[in-house]
Image (cartoon, rainbow, N blue to C red):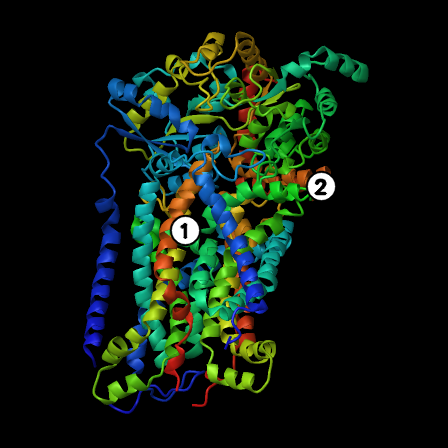
Amino acid sequence: MTDLSHLDRRSLLRLGGLAAGGVGLGLAGPGVITPTRAAAAEVSVECDAGQNENPFLWKSAELQSHFGISPHMVGLPFVGQYEKLVTDLTARSAVYDVLVFPPYFLGDFVQLGFLRELDPYFHLLDPKLADYLPVYRDPVIKRNGKTYALMFDGDLLQVAYRSDLFGDPEEQKNFKAKYNHDLAPPTTWDEYMQVAEFFHRPPKLYGTAFYAQRGFCYAWFINIFAGFGGQWFGKDMKPAIDSDAGVRALALLVEMKKYAPPNILQIDYPTLNEIFLNGSTAIVVQWDDLALKVENPAMSKVVGKGGFAPCPVRSYMPYSRVMAVSAFSKNPDKAYQLASYMQQPEVSATYVYDPDCGQDPYRFSQLNVADVKNHLGKPTMSEAAAKSYVDAIGAGLKAGYPELSIPGAPRYIDLLDLYVNQALAGSLPPKAALGACANEWESITEAYGRKTQQAAYDAWIASFRAVGLQY
Amino acid sequence: MTAPAFNAPAGWPTRRAVPGRRFGWLLVTPALAMFAANCIFPLVYAVLISFQHYQMLIPVPPRFAGLANYVAIFSDPLFWSSLKVTLWFLAGVIFLQFPAGFALALLLDRLPKRADLAATVLLIPTIIAPSVVAFQWIQLYNYQFGPINFLLGLAGIARPTWTGSPSLALPSLMVVDFWEWTPFIMLLLLAGLRALPTDIIEAARVDGSSAWQVTLRMRLPLLRPVIGIAAVLRVLMSFKLFDIIYVLTAGGPGAATENLAYFTYIQAFRYFNLGYASALAILQLILVIVLAKALLALTRQSGRQVLPA
Amino acid sequence: MKGRGFGLREALLSLALAIALAFFLAPVAWMLITAVKPPGEWLTSPPVFWPSHFYWRNFSEALIRWNGLKGLVDSFIVATLSTLLSVLVGIFAAYALARYRTGGENLSFTILSILFMPSVAVGIPMYIFWRRLGLLDSFSALIFQYTVFNVPFVSWVLKSFFEDLNPALEESALANGATRWQAFVDIALPLARPGIIAVALLSFIFSWNEFFFAVILTRARVTTLPVILPTLMEGHDIRWGSIAAMATVAAAPVVLIAFILQRYLVRGLSFGTIHERD
């Protein structure tokens, strides 16, 4: 054996020692390598990563001075947020204090005991719920009469159209000649299709576009479905998604593809924004925060050319965000204070129209044209555009169609999205797609227990009717 | 201490006392422990759960379901379509990636000067994480702004919508998979080529056989074990293909790019339909074992060494 | 062999190589270019193939705002430690399987079958397991999982490697009174060095790139690079430049290591070197 072999044996021993040390380090890792958490004043806020975290960061100075709170953001990826929250909360993880998520998770989360009731904490900082728009007050944030969440972002689908095209006398003349009524923001879905058809002049201008990718295409379907009088469920909790209204709505959405760009199936939220902002579509249905981007010269090529209107007949309210306090938080008082502070009228007014965070209004006090116009030094809208925008929101919410929020909602919705997408992709005709979806919904209802689901659904519907929403 | 230790023949374990037996088992213990932890425990768990109605999100205790989950799977059209997608990816591996990988290996074998460097450079797609790579391919496949469509447009070819097309989405992903893993196959096959005994091959060439004949008749058969290893590895990885689907298409349009792994993921981690998902996993395991055994049997050689002893 | 010098065949082969290089490198080039493009040039028609100026802010955004730096550290810790462990375990198993035929083909297949388990099937019970131990979102969990996944590959490749190694040296050492351990460590291991380095490199790469288990088992304390990347795909205004910068940051270390160790790659996977046979 040469000297070389000795070296190798030693190095093997070194290797072994290193490995052992590595295992030890790995086990001790979290304590050694990551910095220890600060004292009780740190409140961990879970939110989907990106622009929606911004308001918390912007307000951290005030949170520190008013309450001694320093917010620590945990950004989860948008896709997969539900999975992560469920896995963490079933594990009773104390990682999060405040949770920010869409209200359609609420049904499951409340049922599984993930959230604290907030009413006992109101005395710490009055949330001023009277200022909430009715549709958000009880129906969205309460379950069984108890408050489980506070609003953070009130989403709404809205029509955005090219006011320059609509205002052009030549276009108006031609439109009237062809369709026998004035060119104006559509009040029915047939009118919407007419507008889309009229302005469909590829490749420079497309009639319309919509979110057709897997993920949220269901929302655009429900938007139309609501306008045709559709309901999520009928008697005995049987799905009503495959009713005549449903088949008609889905068929209309599929037909809408022909007035849209050829890559319609790739279109998602940012792409839909982009398609309108670069001037290549005449009318779209999109989340209402598109309006804030239209007037921003850094993002938009159609500054001054945006008009806004509520969706025909009814406007769907997909997604949104609420803030809740985790049942496993070690710091519920401070967590509540953070959440309540962020949604105070004067605090939320500072960011609800900020194009850099994508939040949308949910309070009466926020429906303030002056706030929209003079947004704190950032590019703002003209008076006319701001008024049109605020009016559209008000009108839209009056005829708002709520997003399903009973236990199992994420699953019902995800399946609906899959089948709507299959219809859009042409793999299934609308009737078959909705029929298959209804079957899947039935097995979910069975699994959860038909009676309990029925009770939850009825209670939810009742709460909307109580605030005057038609259902 | 005693007679030479290593003359145990290849193949089946022998009953006779092989010297150093204990030493051998000692060495193998850590690996076996890992097998137990990673396979036996999850396997038992998965099998048990697959016979139950167990939905983690529903406050109903799990109850025995017999074969209900398996029956449900076989009558689920989404299962069959996910199986179809999985098999398409597999076909891409076997009929596109392997021939291309072999061609590249032969190519580099003929250009010995820069072979190592070229191999490493060509390996970059494999070195970069699939999920990382997928983000770049979103841009590349973009209908309006992507460079691929731009170049196609210049050439006057109609620009497809790639991941937005029900018919092209799956091929689009197969291209990404091809781009990612062909170099890996090339590496294994090139290494295999290098390890081939040169004397027999030289003899054949001197004998008058053309280079092509030599490759086909002599080298390819000798490579069977290496091809076997590469094939099994790639087939296993292909079944688990997940990252690029997750990033690029979320299984869409419709369910066109949803393979078995992605379908199982949604059932398990989005719906928490654990009984059903476990049954899916067991079925997948059975399928994979059958395929792996078949591949290994096909590529086994009768003697381990080809040389005269 | 090629006494003819630079002929037509050489030219054709070089052309083929060039085409292959172009195909396999083009997306990487696109990634690098995008990483230094300023925001206005990310999504344009026609696409920008060379940025007007180098916008390094993408990198600072990726590293700081999106925690790319932490990602680098976390990925490095996880990948290094799991590689060390899996190579260790794999070498032991490979030697036993090759020299002592321990358990025969069946044991060999069994170890390989670690890879057969569908990720989801392993994911659920392992998630519960780590949760019970209170080790979710810890380095230990990921390191253990990756070690386990790499062991089959390491042991299988090295098993073939050891099988091709001429046992004569070890046999003579044993005959001369060395222990089995000494024969293993002092004789066989050094000869297996290229193979060990090659599988270590590949294991490192697989660990560095792993996505599924990283997503399931980690949250905020441990964030490896593949997990951080999807968070950049927030709903609004996708920062393509930062994504590309982060991708570059995620890829660079591994590519660098691969280049440093390149001469071991092919050689290490060639089971046995030619001159060992006689």
Above or below: residue A103 compared with residue A370: below
Describe the element under mark 2 as helix, strand or loop: helix
Amino acid found under the numbered disc labelled 2: Ala
Q: Residue at x 35, y 36 (%)?
A: C60
Instruction: Determine the residue positioned at 26% across, 17% down.
Output: A66
Report x, y in % for residue C217: 38, 48
Tell me what residue is drawn at x 61 percent, y 18 percent: A470
Q: Chain of mark 1?
A: C
Q: Is residue C62 above or below residue A333?
A: below
User: Which quadrant does the C terminus of chain A fall into?
Assistant: top right
Task: Reply above or below: A250 against B67.
Answer: above
The quadrant where residue A94 appears: top left
Screen quadrant of the N terminus of chain A? bottom left
Give coordinates of residue C206: x percent, y percent: 40, 57
Could you say whether the residue bearing mark 1 is in a helix, strand or loop? Answer: helix
The spot of residue C253 in percent (x, y) is 35, 51
- Residue B17 can be seen in this image: yes
The residue closer to the viewer here, A382 or A337, is A382
Callout 2 environment at 10 Å: few (<14), some (14 to 19), or many (20+)? some
Q: Amino acid at mark 1?
A: Phe
Distance between the alpha carbons at the discs numbered 2 and 1:
37 Å
Residue at mark 1: C213
Exactly how many numbered labels are in the figure?
Answer: 2
Which chain letter goes with mark 2? A
Q: Are marks 2 and 1 in contact (CB under 8 Å)?
A: no
Quadrant in the rendering for residue A427: top right
Residue A432's mark? Answer: 2
> Is residue A258 found left or right of A1 in the rendered image?
right
